[in-house]
Image (cartoon, grey):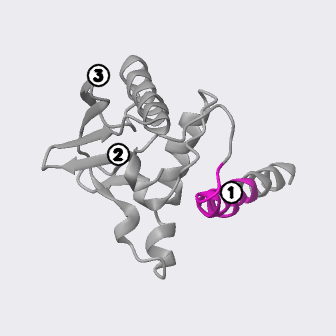
């Protein structure tokens, strides 16, 4: 989403996002609202709580949770990679609903240090089809580092049981 499609105000406890009344702005607002409503209904703990919304103003107010992982510099691969397991868990949970974020970047992943919980935000590009572009490197790293480790452990366990 381009920055021009929404105006965002961040306070200590909330994030207020007002979408412009353009065709794209309406679509992005509806996409995002639908995910927050789904999260409420299904009690998805990895999506911040929707506090209120206005269809007329195309505004969402959500609770502010954690800090964006974008604060970790790109050069700090170890700092970023230590979060891949947590990111993978919430991303795969969203896929259970056959939904794809399609803008999975570190800036759209929040981490709450106190509770050690991860949260996804910014659902404007969500869809039933995976059209991920920017986030592909996160997904590739998850697949390389998380899934390969699991398959190695599984192979190692099966080799031990054969002996």
| Residue 82 left/right relative to 152 | left
Using the image, determine if residue 37 lies above or below residue 66.
Answer: above
Name the spot of residue 17 as percent of width and height, x first. 28, 41
Which of pointers 1 and 2 lies earlier in the amino acid sequence?
2
Q: Residue sitting at 87 percent across and 50 percent down?
A: 162
Count neighbours of disc 1 (C-alpha within 10 A) and say few if under 14, some if 14 to 19, many if 20 or more.
Answer: some
Query: Residue 119 at what x, y percent from top left?
Result: 38, 45
Residue annotated with mark 3: 56
Q: Secondary structure at mark 1?
A: helix
Q: Residues within 10 Å of mark 2 (few under 14, many from 20)?
A: some
- Looking at the figure, which quarter contains the C terminus? bottom right
Viewer-side residue, 57 vs 90: 57
Q: Is residue 138 magenta?
A: yes
Q: Residue furthest front?
A: 22
Residues at discs 3 and 1 in contact (Cβ within 8 Å): no
Q: Which mark is residue 143?
A: 1
**Main secondary structure type of the part rendered in magenta:** helix
Image quadrant where residue 13 sits: top left
Q: CA distance from mark 3 to mark 2?
A: 15 Å
Q: Which residue is mark 2?
A: 6
Q: Secondary structure at mark 3?
A: loop
User: Up-down: is 36 above or below 6?
Assistant: above
> Taking 84 as reference, is 14 left or right?
left
Q: Disc 2 on helix, strand or loop?
A: strand
Question: CB under 8 Å between callouts 3 and 2?
Answer: no
């Amino acid at each position: 989403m381009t920055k021009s499609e929404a105006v965002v105000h961040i306070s200590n406890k909330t994030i207020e996002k007002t979408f412009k009344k353009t065709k794209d702005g309406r679509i992005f607002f509806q996409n995002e609202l639908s995910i927050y409503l789904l999260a409420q209904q299904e009690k998805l703990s990895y999506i911040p709580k929707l506090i209120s919304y206005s269809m007329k103003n195309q505004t969402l107010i959500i609770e502010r949770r954690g800090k964006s992982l974008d604060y970790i510099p790109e050069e700090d691969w170890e700092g970023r990679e230590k979060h891949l397991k947590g990111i993978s868990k919430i991303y795969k949970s969203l896929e259970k609903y056959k939904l794809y974020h399609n803008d999975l970047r570190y800036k759209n992943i929040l981490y709450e240090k106190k509770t050690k919980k991860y949260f996804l935000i910014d659902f404007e590009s969500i869809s039933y089809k995976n059209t991920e572009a920017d986030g592909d490197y996160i997904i590739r790293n998850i697949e390389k580092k998380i899934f390969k480790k699991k398959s190695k452990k599984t192979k190692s366990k099966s080799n031990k049981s054969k002996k």
